[in-house]
Image (cartoon, rainbow, N blue to C red):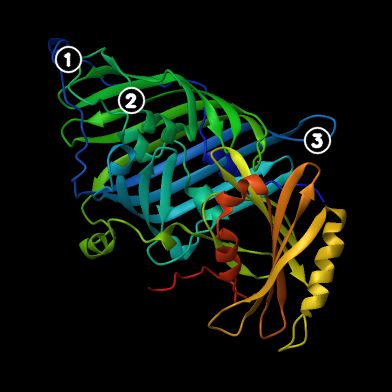
């Protein structure tokens, strides 16, 4: 089986990229050249803005192979059309930036090697909350679980939230430069761990009507544990009469090594968007007041649906690594390191109301682990309020010199349909897994396809 390339645009769009610098064409008032100006977007602004954004990406993916990395040519485009409205943030820095968005369109088309993909935002996720975070924008729905595909699709390079963070922290004169906050640079470029940053912004010119800001620099860091080097430059236009950014363009180039859950890449992206206030916005006051200041913990959970129709929820540090019609592999990555792996596999159905005998399941585990198994430590039924049966087995052993734990789950629906979960984790990483294996396995649903609504509290 070959390793799959998951959501080609998502791998790139969560990052960012560069080529040519396009200056803003705003004339300078000579008489104002030594006068400092303030260029600020008020975070209490209740206006609704219309945003039209476009992204174009070209370059190569790099996948690991026995004879070295294999290059796969990639070309992708994405279009985003939405209304957005600022709402109160949850903290300082990146967390002070938060909007409600109503998407009329979010679509990506990509060609990786000869494989074509088209991705569209699920219709039930049209209205979302976008929350600033140092490593990027976190999207969540107040009514439905998002999927990794949804998150990757919406992770647009040059998102409006970090671009707001590029504005000067105080009054500036024409020609003056400043260092944007680190969170804005990280979010703009999608870098999780920053090692080096020399990105600077500069007030290129201004009039009484508007101002042109340019930015350029390089960033070195890591994404999901893979090292990356990024060069970025671009510009934005600020309307001084309306106190808002109206236009943005950016070019960015990235070279990233092959990672634990993503391919390497040598890509270039060009991003542009236009923004304007609208009188008849689609985001009503009643929805604004309904968004909690601090979302409940289930808001961040993602929903994953297997090719054979089983759905479960997981936190955002799990990433799809490989998928076939009968097997899905997810990996848990935190602080750039691999914590655990989850294999989800289809199991032969039983007759309605029956299930694979517990002794047989344990024998299957012994056969699968072979000499790696030291002992089966525990076997138990997981208590549930519904008729779904979940049998859990904990095994210990070693792979080479590394001590291991395996958590097996056999889930059986009343219809007889079955699915197995296998969590593999090194003993040194066991505390990081905590009880997330039980949470994922317990969230399983054999229900019909479709976007999964969040259960009310």
CB within 8 Å, label 3 to label 2: no
Q: Nearer the viewer, mark 2 or mark 1?
A: 2
| Callout 3–callout 1 Cβ contact below 8 Å | no
Question: Which mark is first along the chain, 2 or 3?
Answer: 3
Q: Is residue 444 above or below residue 316?
A: below
Counting residues from the start of the chain, the first of labels 2 and 1 encountered is 1
Residue 187 lies, in percent from the top left, at 42, 36
Residue at 55% x, 60% y is 435
| Tally of numbered discs | 3
User: Which corner quadrant holds the C terminus?
Assistant: bottom left
Residue 107 % position (x, y): 52, 51
Q: Secondary structure at mark 1?
A: loop
* SS under mark 2: loop
Q: Is residue 389 above or below residue 140?
A: below
Viewer-side residue, 302 vs 123: 302
Q: Is residue 310 visible?
A: yes
Q: Nearer the viewer, residue 383 or 129?
A: 383
Gap between marks 2 and 1, in whole Å?
A: 25 Å
Residue 180 tag number: 2
Q: Which residue is mark 1?
A: 29
> Label 3, label 1: how many angstroms apart (C-alpha)?
58 Å
Residue at the disc numbered 3: 65
| Crowd class of label 1 (few under 14; some 14 to 19; many from 20; radius 10 Å) | few
Helix, strand or loop status at disc 3 = loop
Please state the horizontal and vertical placement of residue 219, each as a whole percent of the image: 48, 23
Image check: 57 left or right of 171?
Answer: right
């Amino acid at each position: 089986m070959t390793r799959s390339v998951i959501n080609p645009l998502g791998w790139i769009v969560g990052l960012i990229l560069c080529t040519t610098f396009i200056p803003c064409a705003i004339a300078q008032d000579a008489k104002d050249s030594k006068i400092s100006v303030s260029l600020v977007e008020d975070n209490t602004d209740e206006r609704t803005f219309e945003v039209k954004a476009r992204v174009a990406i070209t370059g190569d993916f790099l996948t690991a192979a026995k004879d070295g990395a294999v290059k796969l040519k990639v070309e992708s485009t994405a279009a985003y059309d939405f209304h957005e409205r600022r709402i109160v943030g949850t903290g300082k820095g990146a967390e002070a930036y938060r909007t409600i968005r109503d998407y009329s369109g979010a679509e990506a088309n990509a060609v990786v090697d000869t494989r074509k993909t088209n991705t569209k935002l699920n219709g039930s996720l049209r209205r979302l909350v976008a929350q600033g975070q140092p490593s990027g924008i976190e999207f969540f729905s107040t009514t439905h679980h998002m999927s990794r595909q949804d998150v990757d699709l919406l992770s647009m390079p040059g998102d409006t939230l970090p671009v707001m963070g590029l504005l000067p922290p105080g009054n500036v004169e024409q020609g003056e430069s400043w260092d944007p906050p680190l969170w804005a640079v990280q979010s703009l470029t999608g870098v999780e761990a920053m090692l080096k940053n020399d990105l600077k912004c500069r007030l290129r010119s201004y009039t009484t009507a508007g101002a042109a800001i340019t930015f350029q620099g390089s960033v070195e860091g890591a994404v999901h544990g893979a090292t990356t080097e990024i060069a970025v430059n671009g510009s934005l236009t600020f309307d001084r009469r309306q106190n808002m950014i109206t236009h943005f363009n950016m070019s960015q180039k990235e070279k990233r090594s092959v990672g634990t859950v993503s391919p390497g890449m040598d890509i270039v992206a060009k991003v542009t968007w236009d923004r304007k206030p609208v009188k008849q916005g689609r985001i009503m006051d009643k929805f604004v007041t309904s968004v909690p200041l601090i979302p409940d913990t289930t808001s961040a959970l993602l929903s994953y649906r297997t090719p054979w129709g089983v759905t479960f929820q997981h936190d955002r540090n799990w990433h799809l690594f490989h998928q076939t019609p009968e097997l899905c592999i997810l990996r848990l990555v935190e602080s750039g390191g691999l914590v655990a792996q989850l294999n989800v596999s289809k199991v032969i159905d039983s007759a309605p109301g029956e299930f694979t005998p517990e002794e047989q399941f344990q024998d299957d585990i012994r056969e699968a682990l072979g000499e790696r198994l030291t002992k089966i430590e525990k076997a138990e039924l997981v208590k549930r309020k519904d008729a779904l049966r979940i049998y859990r087995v904990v095994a210990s052993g070693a792979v080479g010199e590394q001590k291991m734990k395996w958590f097996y789950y056999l889930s059986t629906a009343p219809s007889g349909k079955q699915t197995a979960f296998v969590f593999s984790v090194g003993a040194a990483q066991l505390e990081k897994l905590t009880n997330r294996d039980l949470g994922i396995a317990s969230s399983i649903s054999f229900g019909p396809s479709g976007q999964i609504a969040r259960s009310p509290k």
